[in-house]
Image (spheres, rainbow, N blue to C red):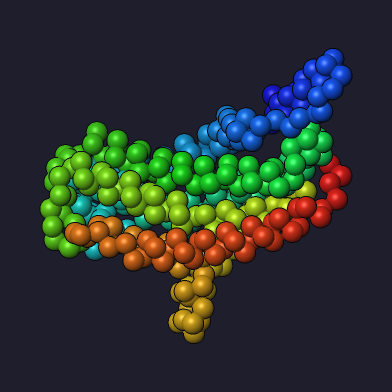
Amino acid sequence: MSLSDEVSARGSGTAASSGREGSAPRQRPSSWWFLGSELKQLFRRRRTQALLLALAAIPVMIAVVVRVSTAVPPGRGPAFLDRITQNGLFVGVTALIVAVPLFLPLTIGVVAGDTIAGEAGHGTLRYLLAAPAGRVRLLLVKYVGAVAFCVAAPLAVALAGAGIGAALFPVGPVTLLSGDVVEPGEALSRMLLIAAYQTVSLLGLSAIGLFLSTLTDVPVGAMAATIVLSVASQVLDQLPQLEWLHPWLFSHYWFGFADLLRQPIGWESFSSNALLQAGYIAVFGALAYGRFVSKDVLS
């Protein structure tokens, strides 16, 4: 059963009971029930599961390739690649670095671009609004669903990396970038912090995808536009002629998690990244609200 079917059934049941009682007005489904239905539908979709499995396959592929290879040239490839054979915990960190520029934005673009346009494309959006779900509440629930995927995506990479790394390589104390040595438990917590950092980094992109999703009834178009913008932002961030623009690009701090691998942990890049993403959420959330509440929903 789709989300629109569940909401319609809930609304119809409430309306029927109201008719029998003859006094109570028709009530909307509760916000928590609505959110739970959205999250359940999101993570039950085979596409969502396939995206998470594809992300989890990245550290597995890296670990297997390193395991079967004779040697990893120092200084070649992604950061920490040459340390994997010494400590399997580096698989997760390396996989997160590999996933940041393309794979994570790609999956976020698919999910965020489908939020509103997907319902319109399937012809269920007007039924959601007639249930009644409410436009503002629907927009918020859809964004929270995208945020939930932003949490799950980096976590899938990190946990799969830790698991395959422990299975194929020795695990022991980890030397941080500052030269300090921490135990495996703390090293794992640092890797989860990096995953949390990446979650925050993707929130602005999710808000952009939500806005683009309100502009069209074709979800593929919103998905593609979101992914293209993520690539364009990273390209612009590499041009020295646009150095003045770099701090305003939503991808500027995507690789700024090195401070989490020092002792003590530096939170400056984390807070700067969070502030930047909050600005994008505010701007594109407002644009999505302005567009969606005035949109003529025909499908």
Q: In screen coordinates, is 16 left or right of 208?
A: right
Residue 14, how many percent across, how many down? Answer: 77, 22
Residue 240, how many percent across, how many down? Answer: 45, 82
- Res. 212 visible in picture: no
Q: Nearer the viewer, residue 262 or 110?
A: 262
- Res. 287 visible in picture: yes
Vertical comparison of 224 with 29: above or below: below
Vertical comparison of 118 with 201: above or below: above
Q: Which residue is rendered at x = 82% and y = 39% of the image?
A: 126
Residue 291, how many percent across, how many down? Answer: 76, 57
Q: In screen coordinates, is 118 left or right of 88?
A: right
**Residue 111, picture quadrant:** top right
Vertical comparison of 232 with 213: above or below: below
Specify the quadrant that holds the C terminus. top right
Q: Which residue is rendered at x = 46% and y = 41% of the image?
A: 152
**Residue 68, picture quadrant:** top left
Q: Nearer the viewer, residue 168 or 294?
A: 294
Q: Which residue is rendered at x = 75% and y = 41% of the image?
A: 134
Q: Nearer the viewer, residue 205 or 241?
A: 205
Residue at the outermost bottom position: 241
Q: In screen coordinates, is 99 left or right of 71?
A: right
Residue 282, how many percent across, how many down? Answer: 59, 61
